Image: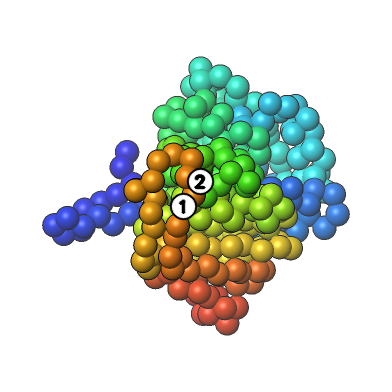
Amino acid sequence: MSDDTQNGPGRTTRKVPKGILVAIGGNEDKEDDLFILRTLVSLIEKKDGENVRIELITTASEIPDKVGEMYTEAFSKIENTFLGIMNIERREEAMDPSLLERIKLADIIFFSGGDQLRITSILGGSPVLLELREKYYNEFCIVAGTSAGASAMSETMIYGGTASEALLKGIVHMTVGIGLIGRVIIDSHFIKRGRFSRLMQIISSHPGKIGLGLGEDTGVVIEKGRYIKAIGSGLVVIFDGQNLRYTNITDIPDGEAIAIENVHVHTIVKGYGYDLKERKYLRPEDMECLDLVCK
């Protein structure tokens, strides 16, 4: 299934999804106010007494049982929620018809943290992922991810490279993500792990993309594949390379430092947003004028 439709010679228009993405920078509060997890649940409207059905996919984690226990405890503190856990550790498990039915019935599909390459290698092209994509584009639902689960959401996914080595050509790598959004590249644990240079390097070689650096206990709600709104306690850093004037990245060998001129950088916090299509900063009063679910 293609998520693009042709709109005149040489032009491609991405299908507007009916679902909402929530990308979280990792280490969201699971013990006290649970603000981000409560925000997830609040985006789903149910009749009184009906449970919000959440399916947690722990594929990214090498300790899925422990991760499942943590989220079971966290969501037990939020009324009217039902949590199912999908410990999909091998590709053949992602073909199980019972899991496809659970995806169809879910209100929220949540990817845990861990290693984003496990998500793409185990789930990429699988019936579970195809069902999830079909649901996201054609039905109202929430697809959420934290840490690695957030980084895997986009078409182009970042991995590898430490903060100290970034901005050296060839250190940071990219591969294909699960393809739920095309305009951005998402990085997590952004402030605490000092990943500014890591995402800056990626934008220098892909200036048409927008980089989203998500702080811990912080995330973005992405509606209509376009409008983002910051939630949580910290910062979201936005890198826009559309007006990049110069970089030496094509002229240097691997391992050498990269020169970059004129990358635009913004920060947004709770209540602020950004229009990915227009590349426009949105203040709280701008957000209030938009017809969005996340108020």
Name the residue beneath numbered marker 1.
258
The amino acid at mark 1 is Ile
Residue at the location (76% across, 40% down)? 71
Q: Is residue 228 above or below residue 18?
A: below
User: In this orientation, does residue 294 appear?
Assistant: no
Picture residue at 16% right of the left edge, 59% below the top: 8
Q: Is residue 270 visible?
A: yes
Q: With 160 as the anchor, is 27 left or right in this view? A: right
Closest to the observer, 75 or 26: 26
User: What residue sits 53% from the left and 67% below the top?
Assistant: 265
Q: Residues within 10 Å of mark 2 (few under 14, many from 20)?
A: many
The foreground one among 263 and 222 is 263
Residue 152: x and y, percent?
A: 53, 41
Q: Are the two marked residues, 2 and 1, in contact with CB atoms closer than 8 angstroms?
A: yes
Q: CA distance from mark 2 to mark 1?
A: 6 Å
Dot 1 alpha-carbon crowd within 10 angstroms: few under 14, some 14 to 19, many 20 or more? many
Task: Name the disc covering residue 168, or none.
Answer: 2
Furthest residue toward left:
9
- The quadrant of the image that shows the N terminus is top left
Q: Residue at x 54, y 32 (%)?
A: 117
- The residue sitting at the bottom extreme is 285
Q: Who is closer to the viewer here, 237 or 25?
A: 237
Q: Residue 179 is drawn in which quadrant? A: top left
Image coordinates for residue 271, horizontal then vertical, percent: 64, 72
**What is the x, y in percent for residue 234?**
71, 63
Of the numbered discs 2 and 1, the one sitting upstream in the chain is 2
Tag 2: amino acid: Leu
Seen in the picture, residue 15 relative to 230 is either above or below; the reply is above
